[in-house]
């Protein structure tokens, strides 16, 4: 297939479909990463009245990592597509802002410093607006 044809195939997806794909991919990758991390940790020993503690812990870690990666992927692609449609440009700035917003909101929420994340985002967007 010619590279120019691949470019046209890439634009067939709508923004909503790209967000769904990004979220799904984040969920799959996060679940796999959660499995790997769970296998690195010590598995609790099996006790008499506790049913499958190792499996429960592994499933919990898989869910945590899967949800986090899915949220980061969805927010990243969503902000990137939002900026691309708003600015009518497809450049590195869209991805940079998408990554910043995804990291600041999702990881800031998990560490409980969401207000600081939004303050940084506002400062960053003000600086970009002034120099753009």
Image (cartoon, grey):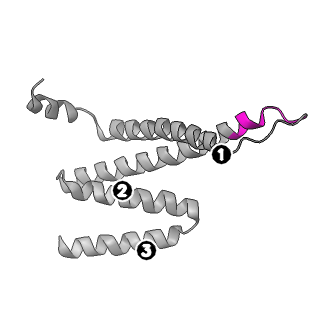
| Earlier sequence position, callout 2 versus callout 3 | 2
Please tell me which of labels 2 and 1 falls first in the chain.
1
**Marking on residue 80:** none
> What percent of the width, then of the height, locates residue 72?
45, 50
How many neighbours does mark 3 have within 10 angstroms: few (below 14), some (14-19), or many (20 or more)?
Answer: few
Q: Which SS class for mark 2?
A: helix
Residue 1 as seen in the image, left or right of residue 13: left
Q: Is residue 28 above or below residue 107?
A: above
Give the residue pinned by disc 1. 41
Place of residue 101 in the rendered image (x, y in percent of width and height, measured from the top left): 39, 60
Going by the picture, which residue comes out furthest to the right?
48
In space, the residues marked 2 and 1 are separated at their CA atoms by 29 Å
Please state the extent of the stretch shown in magenta in the rendering: 49-57
Q: Does the segment drawn in magenta span residue 50?
A: yes
Q: Which residue is mark 3?
A: 119
In this rendering, position of residue 107 left or right of residue 15: right
- Please state the horizontal and vertical placement of residue 43, each as a whole percent of the image: 72, 41
Which residue is rendered at x = 78% and y = 32% of the image?
52
Query: Looking at the rendered structure, which numbered label has been put on residue 99?
Result: 2
Task: Name the quadrant containing residue 61.
Answer: top right
Q: Observer-nearest residue: 107 or 83? A: 107
The image position of residue 59, as x and y in percent, is 65, 37
């Amino acid at each position: 297939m010619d590279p120019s044809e691949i470019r046209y195939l890439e634009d067939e997806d709508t923004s909503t479909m790209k967000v769904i794909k990004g979220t799904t991919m984040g969920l799959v990758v996060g679940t796999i990463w959660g499995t790997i991390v769970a296998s690195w940790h010590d598995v609790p020993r099996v006790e008499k009245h506790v049913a499958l503690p190792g499996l429960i812990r592994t499933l919990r870690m898989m869910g945590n990592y899967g949800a986090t990666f899915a949220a980061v992927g969805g927010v990243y692609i969503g902000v990137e597509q939002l900026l691309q449609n708003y600015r009518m440009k497809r450049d590195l700035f869209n991805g940079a802002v998408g990554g910043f917003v995804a990291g600041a909101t999702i990881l800031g929420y998990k560490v409980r410093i969401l207000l600081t994340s939004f303050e940084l985002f506002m400062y960053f967007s003000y600086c970009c607006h002034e120099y753009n």
